[in-house]
Image (spheres, rainbow, N blue to C red):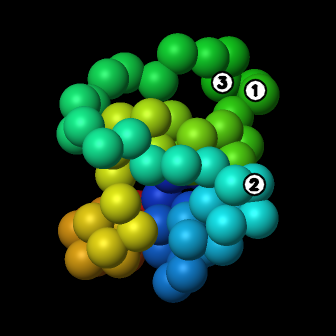
Amino acid sequence: MAVVTELFCEPGAYENILRRAAFSVSPHVEFAPYVGIAEGITRESVARHFTACGVTITAADNELGPWAQTRRALL
């Protein structure tokens, strides 16, 4: 969860990864659990997962960014 929080706390980080890695956001919002080895989680793998779930840059900025900042403040 720390990598998710870090990614969305930093304004523009999700967008930058999507553009740099040429990830396309799924047109269908369909959340799913992340499947992977905890030690191998990177910002890029988290971004890839969220794009597959249909999380747009706008949703990341408007919803996940504030959530991540609140979560970080509580830790």
Residue marked by disc 1: 39
Please determine whether, in this image, residue 35 is positioned above or below residue 74: above
Q: Report which residue position mark 2 lands on.
A: 21
For label 3, the SS is helix
Q: Nearer the viewer, residue 5 or 16?
A: 16
Whole-percent x and y of residue 75? 40, 62
- Disc 1 crowd rating (10 Å Cα; few below 14, some 14-19, many 20+) is few
Q: Quadrant of residue 26?
A: top left
- 22 to 36, vertically: above or below: below
Disc marking residue 23: none
Task: Give the number of marks.
Answer: 3
- Element under disc 2: helix
At label 2, which amino acid type do we have? Ala
Residue 26 seen by the camera: yes
Q: Residue furthest bottom?
A: 11
- Give left or right: position of 55 versus 36: left
Nearest to the observer: residue 14 or residue 23: 23
